[in-house]
Amino acid sequence: MGSQKRIAKELSELVESPPAGISVELADEANLYEWKVHMKGPEGSPYQGGVFLLKLSLPTAYPFKPPTVSFATKIYHPNVTNDEKGSMCLGMLRADEWKPSSKISAVLQFARQLLAEPMPDDAIEGRIAEQYRNDRQRYDEVAREWTRKHAAHQ
Amino acid sequence: MADNGDRVFCHACGGVWSRADSDLTCPHCESDFTEIIEIPPDPDTPPPEQDPEPRTPPINPWADHNPWDRDEAAGPRPFGFMDSGSPGYSQHTYRSPDGRFTFSSTTIGGGYSSRQSAATAPTNPLLPMMFEGLNALFQGLQETHEPHEARSPGLDDPFMAHSSSWPNIDPGVSNAHAGHEGLFPRDTDRAQPMTPPVASLADLLEAFRTDFGGPRQQGRHGARGVAGPNPLAMLSALLNMDRNGDAVYSQEELDRVISQLIDHNNSGTAPPPASDSAIRSLPTKKVDREMLGSDGKAECSICMDAVELDTEVTVLPCTHWFHYTCIEAWLTQHNTCPHCRRGIDSVECTGEGTSENPVIIEDSSEAPSSGRRRRRSSPFSLRSSRSSGSRSTPQSPTPESSEPRNRRGSRGSRGSRSERGGITGWVWSRFGGSNE
């Protein structure tokens, strides 16, 4: 299948030369469509020092349909749902915004960039976005605290 | 409610007596384990006189009329069975299955038809209030949604209008109403809509359903024939106004509305599929050295396979090229370039080499145009040169004034996604060029 070929290719590229702060592996060696992603909190962000586990799921119609990305590690962030799903609001992954020429590498880099620069205007957690805008100090504190609590790298 | 009409049941001796004084002690066994009961009344006791109370609606001219005046004028009669002895006077009594309510219907004179529903001696003050509230509500609804019909049969008779606006339970009775000029007042304080309860509710809902949505059926009785199978479903539909409103009453409803909006949004903004003919008519060409770029390598950005020299590829109007099978799979879902999102139908946009759009795709795939800009190393660098060009030209004065504007317009509708604000624009601006 074309999609498997492309996925395998992207995977091997990502494993060979991973983007900064990102490492990928298959959640299950037999399944190309479920990935585990470890993402380091970007330097200078309140997530620094944490390692976040993300799940990346590829549809069988990939690359014609977008992958989905979610945080398995709890994270305090305006663009990540504060629930057990940890869904991430990525505009480029929306069905009507997705382009087949986008690579998983770009998706993951974007996700990491979003940790460094939250987008409160596209927030999924309005309360955190509000805090991010109006009380950045407090937001930093809580995000740091959550990072220490949930994403501490041992 | 502890007036003289109450009956008291003694739990000790099982006796029932009419409560003449305010004493609740059983006259037989002197037990005070007694209970005021409302119904059924003693068969030999006439129902208590109903004080003429203010009724709803206040416009009812019969509001202060006491039907039992006539009753007494015709002589005391036993309560609880049908009496057709007096000409033009008949009385029906219905008892609810559990025996808690008794309804009487009285027809007086030549066509004085009425349904006098008397929940005799109601001891629960909530019941009349509830019915009153329901009545007011239903009347309000009916008058709001069916003002014309409500008034049509007897404009000069407010009660008539009121009566005809009801979904009548019994067609016969309703016809009797319409056929006579004098009407016995209905007791709107009482349980009129409860006889017989289920049919009444269904009729009521049906009347509302036909009022709220859909074409009106052939009158009310015609509508009854198509009554929905489930009154509850209809009630739910009513509450949600046939789901047209944005007022929701439960979490599930809210979820449903939201997902509906999301679905709608997705299908509304995602580009539609391209037609088969449009896909088939796309030009193809063999990959040449220029397309491979300086490093001599190129790949189809859909399957990400390397593309060798002389491979035949399909070229979109935006000059991005792909394997035919790859681009076909995408175009059958969306009619835009999978890389730059430009529409594949906007062939005319690439027609001439203007400053805005210096790139030309040859109609005949083989003819390499010498003077064109063909020094792109890969489709991806082409994309960035294009998008930067499209951004800059709107500011720069262009000789052809009308043509570029058209072009800009068509881009604005379809191709301008590279200039989106928000998260997507940010994504593309940040990562769009880093794809190769």
Image (cartoon, rainbow, N blue to C red):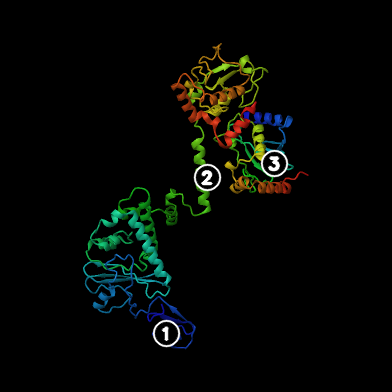
> What separation in Å lies between label 2 and label 3 (alpha carbons)?
34 Å
Instruction: Tell me if I can see residue B34 in this picture.
Output: yes
The chain holding disc 3 is A
Foreground mark, 3 or 1? Answer: 3
At which x and y percent is residue B216? Answer: 33, 50
Q: CA distance from mark 3 to mark 1?
A: 81 Å
- Circles 1 and 2 on the same chain: yes
Q: Amino acid at mark 2?
A: Ser
Query: With B199 as the anchor, is A122 left or right in this view?
Result: right
Which numbered marker is on residue B262? none
Give the letter of the chain under mark 1.
B
Please rate how many residues cluster around mark 2, counting C-alpha atoms within 10 Å: few if below 14, some from 14 to 19, many from 20: few
The quarter holding residue B154 reads bottom left
- Residue B57: x and y in percent read 32, 65
Q: Is residue B236 left or right of residue A13?
A: left
Mark 2 on the same chain as mark 3? no
Residue to which mark 3 is pinned: A45
- Among numbered discs 1 and 2, the one appearing first in the sequence: 1
Residue B22 marker: 1
Q: Is residue B63 depicted above or below B404 in this figure?
A: below
Secondary structure type for disc 2: helix
Residue B259's mark? 2
Task: Give how far across and how far down residue A118 sits, in percent.
Answer: 63, 41
Please state which of residues A113 and A6 is positioned toward the viewer in this rendering: A113
Marks 3 and 1: CB-CB under 8 Å? no
Residue drawn at x 32%, y 60% as measured from the top left:
B168
Nearest to viewer (mark 2 / mark 3): 3
Question: What residue appears at the point 42 percent right and 51 percent down from the top-left corner?
Answer: B241
Image quarter for residue B422?
A: top right
